[in-house]
Image (cartoon, grey):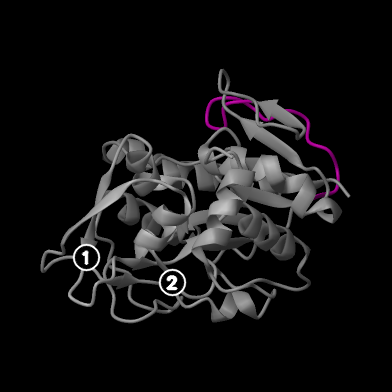
Amino acid sequence: MIGPLVLGASGEIGRSLARVWAMVAPGAGPGLWQHRPGAATPPDVPSSSWDILAEAPPALPAGLSGIVVLAGVTAGDAAALALNTRLAEAALALARAHGIGRVLLASSQAVYGAHSGPARENSLCAPLNAYGAAKLAMEQALAGAPEVTALRIGNYAGSGALFHAARKGPVSLDQFPDGRSPLRSYIGPISLARVLAALLAAPGPLPPVLNVALPGGVDMAALLQAAALPFTFRPAPATALPEAVMDVTALQGLLTMPFAAADTLVAEARAGGLLPP
């Protein structure tokens, strides 16, 4: 088993997945992990350095189980964010040129924007920021391609704005009248590796879009407490969202997943090298 071609292995998600891949998904094959020229090599996995949009890919081994597209742009102007679509299109072209029948495209929960109740794959998408809009445009550009499944990934334990800020010092969390902080959908490196391995091995066609997170929501305060990261509370403004979670029923139909728990997510983040031991 060769495993997948993973594009974008030098980012936080890619490097954390590389750390746990062999332990979590040994039957999926080691894969081939692409990273940008000059970027740190992902640990403990076969890797290759090339610029997806500027260079021809290296010779690819036969028998790849699919392409996982983690490569993308999270910030910048409209031209920078539009690279998300160009990278996805390049991955699809690569898959078709090499007869690879499955492309798992990392999208984001941000495509939904604010919503009432758990967001389902057929819920209205109304992104609140340019990043969410860029990911939605990426999805729409590849809609209808039978090889592609867009993975609307929830918050990633150990990464993202919350953890980046908390590692620098105490952060302020919104506190709602019931005493709770924001409830959000989360997934960690180990759980995401299991999801990717299961989707790559799943027989038959996959849905065009899948929400990807552990079932249930996680209170941000509980997550920071489990990680021993400092925070304070502030009264939540009227515009704050007490809850932004996704319905993952469709994903649960493809593999068994435990409910989200703060301590488990923190343990996953540590295993992926996103938090200190």
Q: For residue 59: magenta?
A: yes
To which quarter of the image does residue 237 belong? bottom left
Q: For residue 212: magenta?
A: no
Q: Could you tell me residue 255's position as x and y percent?
A: 70, 74
Q: Which residues are magenta?
A: 50-65
Q: Could you tell me residue 135's position as x and y percent?
A: 40, 54
* Badge 2 density bin: few <14, some 14–19, many ≥20, Cα 10 Å: many
* Badge 1 density bin: few <14, some 14–19, many ≥20, Cα 10 Å: some
- From the image, tell me which residue sits under label 2: 217
Callout 2 amino acid: Gly
Q: Is residue 141 visible?
A: no
Q: Residue at x 19, y 65 (%)?
A: 240
Q: Could you tell me residue 36's position as x and y percent?
A: 57, 26
Q: Which residue occupies the foreground of this view, 65 or 17? A: 17
Is 51 displayed left or right of 237 in the figure?
A: right
Callout 1 amino acid: Gln
Q: Is residue 108 visible?
A: yes
Is 5 displayed left or right of 144 in the figure?
A: right
Q: Which residue occupies the foreground of this view, 9 or 141? A: 9
Magenta region, main secondary structure = loop
Instruction: Classify mark 1: helix, strand or loop.
Output: strand
Rendered image: mark on residue 175:
1
**Residue at the extreme left:** 238
